[in-house]
Amino acid sequence: EAGVAQSPRYKIIEKRQSVAFWCNPISGHATLYWYQQILGQGPKLLIQFQNNGVVDDSQLPKDRFSAERLKGVDSTLKIQPAKLEDSAVYLCASSFRPGTGNTIYFGEGSWLTVV
Amino acid sequence: AQTVTQSQPEMSVQEAETVTLSCTYDTSESNYYLFWYKQPPSRQMILVIRQEAYKQQNATENRFSVNFQKAAKSFSLKISDSQLGDTAMYFCAFLSGTYKYIFGTGTRLKVLA
């Protein structure tokens, strides 16, 4: 079974530029998550989708971050314009359905460095 | 609001020895799930073990076991017969009824040869 796919793995951009990350969840997984993990910290949820609807985006900096999940499968996370403090690993994860203790499966992450 | 606290930023253990990683959490809910995830240097997080709060029996998974103390809101991970491949960041996570996973800040474990 294929895992959660993310691209690109690494990206270096200058501040004020834009960047987009792509995620393809495990087939059949209705719930998709984007986490931000700053070095030395635990993952912080940015946005959670159930199919193509947003369940939680309370910690998404909406003035610069946006995310969409068209057709309830792939998802794209965009940052525009980027700030130095956005340097982090962006983790995509998916689960079969929320709650009931379903395990979430993570991708390898997309490393972003803003210079 | 729920919180997850891992008070040990770094730990080390000799190969073949046993180590225990601590995790405490705060919640007013009675039904929830707890997890330990491992994040090796390659950065992909993988599930180590999970515990349902309504189960009194502690979960075990081969060399990994937990000590779940619901009243104390404590959820520690014990790794027996530590191996070099266990070197990683370990995150404790809480899943509430609102389906939101909350992660601790992690414990960096180094297994020494």
Image (spheres, coloured by chain):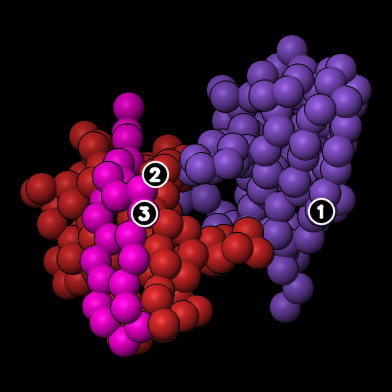
Chain colours: A purple, B red
Q: Quadrant of the N terminus of chain A?
A: bottom right
Residue for point 40% across, 63% down: B109
Name the secondary structure under disc 3.
strand
Nearer-the-camera pick, A34 or B100 = A34
Checking the image for residue A47, the label placed there is none
Residue behind mark 1: A9
Q: Chain of mark 3?
A: B
Name the secondary structure under disc 1.
loop
**Cα separation between marks 2 and 1:** 24 Å
Q: Position of residue A17 (x, y in %)?
A: 90, 23
Residue behind mark 2: B104
Residue for point 45% across, 75% down: B86
Are labels 1 and 3 assigned to the same chain?
no
Residue for point 35% across, 83% down: B15
Q: Is residue A99 left or right of residue A31?
A: left
Nearer-the-camera pick, A104 or A64 = A64
Q: Residues within 10 Å of mark 3 (few under 14, many from 20)?
A: few
Amino acid beneath label 1: Arg
Residue behind mark 3: B10
The stretch of residues the image draws in magenta is B1-23
